[in-house]
């Protein structure tokens, strides 16, 4: 596979690490363009999972025997590796393993939000938020009496930063913003939003589910108070997500899941909590998944995250240009040279689900629906869109295959 020192981005070498790409769907070669939902998993990561179960499968932090010691060390070091990957200098103490980005959101919402929010407090979000954030903070606001407000998205798919500066006030306690929109491909100025939030003594939570897999991320440079992402979108396994939090904030928060491993001492009258990050990882944790996530970080770093970003943005720009050739296609979000590695679109008179069905018949896998952004789709005046999302193993030829397959949709619904 390619390395940061390679003269070019060797897509074919990378594709060799993903045998699933050799599949055929019907009579067509698989073209997998649903990476914003879940990326494929390279052999190296699959091997790390197999190695765990074959050689040192045991529970962590609970045994003195050899297998438990080996599993504990690998699991703890996985936290350190993930911390390094996102620029968290505090190491494992600032990295909580969860099931996914959604659970990371809920961890902060319940462990911090229920204790800190009340009537008169405000939560500021954006109109492009994923339901994982929008629904979570919406429900916490109902429980606490807080108010949720939304930064507007302009006609080109960008955040209205003037509106953001008006909306974020001294009453704002939390700003929760998506780093990269999973529908528009917009890359939001999260560092600027962090500055505005902190000027008003507010915290900022960044949803990095669509950014960490595709670009270098430094949570300290962003100055995020909390940051979340999922393993399954970045060559890792399903079932593991990450919550980064500044140590002083995680220290001050009480856990909201209770049970084994997250405790220090238990009596019949009371309990005390384990040190960070374990106090937020109740029960048997995501051991093999966490270890495999660290392997995924190694895999992506071997390629080079700057190069991953350039490749994805180049494919998105190419797809934007190709789709812009057709008057019956509406592309959602910014121009092709100013978006992340995805393109959402509608085809006149053809529902997105029908588009997806026809593309699938030609071996092209895309996502169709509202992409867990129903309010954003309502604002845009569309019930659903089709989304092609790209990753390290995709090619311009696959974008061409997508465009060619859309011709069949036109013919069928003409």
Image (cartoon, rainbow, N blue to C red):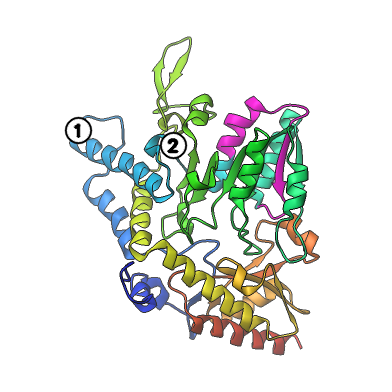
Residue occupying the point 53% across, 44% down:
227
Image position of 67 with respect to 326: above or below = above
Query: In which quadrant is the N terminus drawn?
Result: bottom left
Q: List the residue tagged with mark 2.
A: 94
Does label 2 or label 1 sit earlier along the sequence? Answer: 1
Residue 364 visible in the current orientation: yes
Residue 228 in the figure: left or right of residue 172: left
Viewer-proximal residue, 161 or 320?
161
- Residue 116 is covered by the magenta coloring: yes
Residue for badge 1: 65
Question: What residue appears at the point 55 percent right and 61 percent down from the top-left corner?
Answer: 37
Residue 297 painted magenta:
no
Residue 93 is labelled as none
Instruction: Give coordinates of residue 75: x percent, y percent.
Output: 32, 41
190 relative to 154, above or below: above
User: In the rendered structure, which segment of residues is drawn in magenta?
Assistant: 106-129
Q: Quadrant of residue 137?
A: top right
x and y, in percent, of residue 279 in the image:
44, 28
């Amino acid at each position: 596979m390619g390395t940061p020192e390679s003269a070019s981005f060797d897509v074919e070498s990378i594709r060799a690490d993903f045998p699933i790409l050799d599949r055929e769907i019907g009579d067509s070669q698989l073209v997998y363009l649903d990476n914003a939902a879940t990326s494929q998993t390279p052999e190296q990561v699959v091997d790390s999972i197999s190695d765990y179960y074959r050689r040192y499968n045991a529970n962590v932090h609970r045994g003195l025997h050899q297998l438990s010691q080996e599993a504990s060390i690998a699991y703890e070091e996985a936290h350190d590796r993930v911390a390094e990957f996102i620029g968290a200098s505090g190491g494992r103490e600032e990295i909580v393993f969860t099931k996914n980005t959604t659970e990371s959101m809920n961890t902060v919402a319940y462990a911090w939000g229920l204790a800190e929010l009340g009537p008169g407090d405000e939560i500021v979000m954006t109109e492009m938020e994923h339901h994982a954030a929008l629904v979570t903070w919406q429900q916490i606001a109902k429980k606490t009496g807080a108010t949720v407000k939304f930064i507007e998205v302009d006609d080109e798919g960008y955040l209205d930063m003037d509106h953001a500066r008006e909306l974020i006030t001294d009453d704002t306690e939390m700003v929760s913003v998506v780093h990269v929109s999973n529908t528009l491909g917009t890359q939001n100025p999260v560092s600027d939003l962090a500055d505005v939030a902190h000027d008003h003594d507010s915290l900022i939570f960044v949803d990095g589910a669509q950014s960490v897999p595709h670009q270098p991320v430094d949570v300290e440079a962003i100055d995020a108070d909390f940051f979340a992402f999922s393993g399954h979108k970045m060559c890792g396994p399903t079932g593991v997500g990450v919550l980064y939090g500044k140590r002083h904030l995680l220290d001050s928060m009480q856990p909201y899941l209770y049970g084994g491993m997250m405790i220090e001492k238990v009596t019949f009258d009371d309990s005390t909590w384990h040190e960070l990050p374990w106090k937020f990882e109740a029960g048997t944790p995501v051991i093999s998944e966490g270890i495999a996530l660290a392997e995924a970080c190694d895999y992506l770093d071997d390629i080079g995250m700057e190069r991953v970003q350039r490749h994805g943005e180049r494919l998105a720009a190419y797809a934007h240009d190709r789709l812009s050739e057709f008057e019956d296609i509406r592309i959602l979000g910014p121009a092709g040279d100013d978006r992340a590695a995805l393109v959402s679109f509608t085809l006149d008179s053809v529902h997105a689900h029908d588009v997806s069905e026809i593309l699938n018949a030609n071996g092209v896998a895309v996502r169709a629906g509202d992409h867990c952004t129903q309010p954003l789709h309502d604002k845009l005046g569309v019930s659903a869109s089709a989304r092609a999302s790209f990753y390290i193993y995709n090619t311009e030829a696959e974008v061409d295959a997508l465009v060619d397959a859309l011709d069949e949709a036109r013919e069928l619904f003409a």
